[in-house]
Amino acid sequence: MSSVSLENLDISYGNVPIVKKLDLTIRDGEFLVLLGPSGCGKSTLLSAIGGLTDVSGGRILFNDKDVTWTDPKDRGIGMVFQSYALYPTMSVERNLSFGLRIAGIDRAIIERKVKWAAELLQIAHLLDRKPSALSGGQRQRVAIGRALVRDADIFLFDEPLSNLDAKLRAELRLEIKKLHKTLKSTMIYVTHDQIEALTLADRIAVMKDGIIQQLDTPLNVYNKPANEFVGSFLGSPAMNKVEGQLAADGDRLFFAAGDFRLDVSRYLFAQTAESGRKVVLGLRPEHILPASGSAAAIEGKVSLVEPMGSSILAWSVFDGVSLSHLVGQDDGCEADRAFAVTIDVQKASFFDVETGWRL
Amino acid sequence: MMPQAKPAAAAKRPLTYQEVWGRAGIYAFLGVLALFFLLPLYVMLVTSFKSMDEIRLGLIFSLPQQFTVDAWVKAWTSACTGLECTGLRVGFGNSVKILLPSVVFSILLGALNGYALSFWKVKGANVLFACLLLGSFIPYQVFIYPLVRVYAQTGIYGSLPGIVLTHVIFGMPVMTLLFRNYYSGLPVELFKAARIDGAGFWKIFIAIILPMSVPIAIVAVIMQVTAIWNDFLLGLVFAGRENLPMTVQLNNIVNTTTGERAYNVNMAATVLTSLVPLAVYLLSGRWFVRGIASGAVKG
């Protein structure tokens, strides 16, 4: 059991800063996901927590103990890599026990631990095989097992599911979630896959250019993105973004972009939003609902539909503004036909045009 | 993984008339080339099985009228190298004594260097590596005199350790390059995982990296065996009188200036000397090509 604190952390390769002045506290037993596009520094950060990358400034604390310059093996961590990183010349059993054998642990204890991990991960029947004789999913189970037998306090996952096909990915994702529930260890998980982040995390840290953009629960990150980047990085199909300005009309506040007008009086602005302010409206496709004859309906023309199985993604133009929105299979939405929608303003997001931060 | 299916349809398509003639031309050309390059070997073998009387007739392409292995026996047991007439077998023994430790140590050192350079990001590693490579482009001759002086000072000049050390030093750049390039193709996560598992520099090298190095080690063995066996200059300079390798002895046999030139013995001795690299090439051609393709050349 361990908490992790990063204080004012700087990491750079040569003169190129990768992670800048980063502060982050991960609670004991928490499942934290570092989410971001490739090159945002999330893997580098994980590698530094594991002691595999030297930091150029700041401190790393495990349970309030400074481990910034502690050797990886003495940090009480287990790490799982995207490429599995199994030792190819050793059997599964020897892969699992390698670390314990180095530590000179008693044979009987090693055997017991390997057996426990193998059974937990359902790889007990594979112990004599070489990694090359395993499937991708089995290999990743072995890699997780290798972290398990070390009795790690903190598990570090570096995009562990990215090399697997979609079905296996979903399966192992569930497995990892169960594992976290069973072990209650602190887990830090790096991914660029938003679904993994949303499903697994207690909290998500969305990163960009070495800076954490937002650190919050999956629901809050999804529903109340802190800035335009977070809003558009999460969500599939992607968030609609419309540039326009706020306009007051009597005691009501409107969002206007050309002919497009939307009553936003019910939106809870975090800051006072004055009339005339230039903003970006962020609207998720599922928050534009098929209108059921209400007065607030907006009429538009459907230009394209993309059936996605459970629902249909429609692209329509409303008063000169093109928006994608989700409709049901039975809503009668067809290309080149008129279609009316209502917009759930409370679930929309407004961002400042210049800074991109949420209003 | 399924083995990749060959495009059977393409292979079975009947060739057009033009293609048949094209192929025939290519094969004819290749055949002639092969014959041309095999000709010297043929002459050597044929000559080595003739008696001197027959050789004097001057028909170098004709098969031996009276087949005899006398020249081979003489070359192996009693040909004169300078004053001693004990044949090539002494040189063969010396070459083996030089070869084995030189090959083993140069490969181990190359693997260790390559491992350190590609996995442990040592400060200045690239500069070090560049210097090492630069060293391999400077002609041997430049190093010889300074090395002789150093060896003389340390007392290993003209001894077996001296010549072995020389081969290890001169083999190091290429061996390091070979292993470094092979190791840089391995996933670095392997190394990271081992560090988290608590393995140190030597443990990672011995338990994880070396067992994975078998393919490239075979290539290295081939390269070093042929290079060290064929070496003449270093053996002549550094091995000392007691340990002269087979190539030096061959030269002494062939270049004897007194009396009649025993062409048959010379030819037999030459073939004997080249047997080891020849065998290595023939038995391991596939690996050799693979090694050249996988690391020795690409920088």
Image (tube, coloured by chain):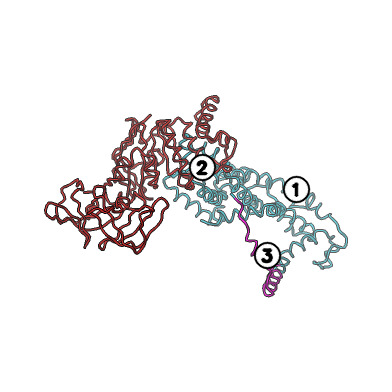
Magenta span: B2-30
Residue hosting label 2: A137
Q: Which quarter shows the N terminus of chain A?
A: top left
The chain under label 3 reads: B
Q: Could you tell me which secondary element the residue under label 3 belongs to?
A: helix
Q: Contact, CB < 8 Å: mark 1 with mark 2?
A: no
Mark 3 vs 1, N-terminal side: 3
Q: Residues within 10 Å of mark 1 (few under 14, many from 20)?
A: some
Instruction: Using the image, determine if residue A125 lies above or below residue B83.
Output: above
> What residue do we see at 23% from left, 54% from top?
A296
**Residue B283 lies in the magenta stretch:** no
In the rendered structure, the colour chosen for chain A is red
The chain under label 2 reads: A
Q: Amino acid at mark 3?
A: Lys
Residue B198 x, y percent position in the rendering: 47, 34
The total of numbered circles placed on residues is 3
Residue hosting label 1: B89
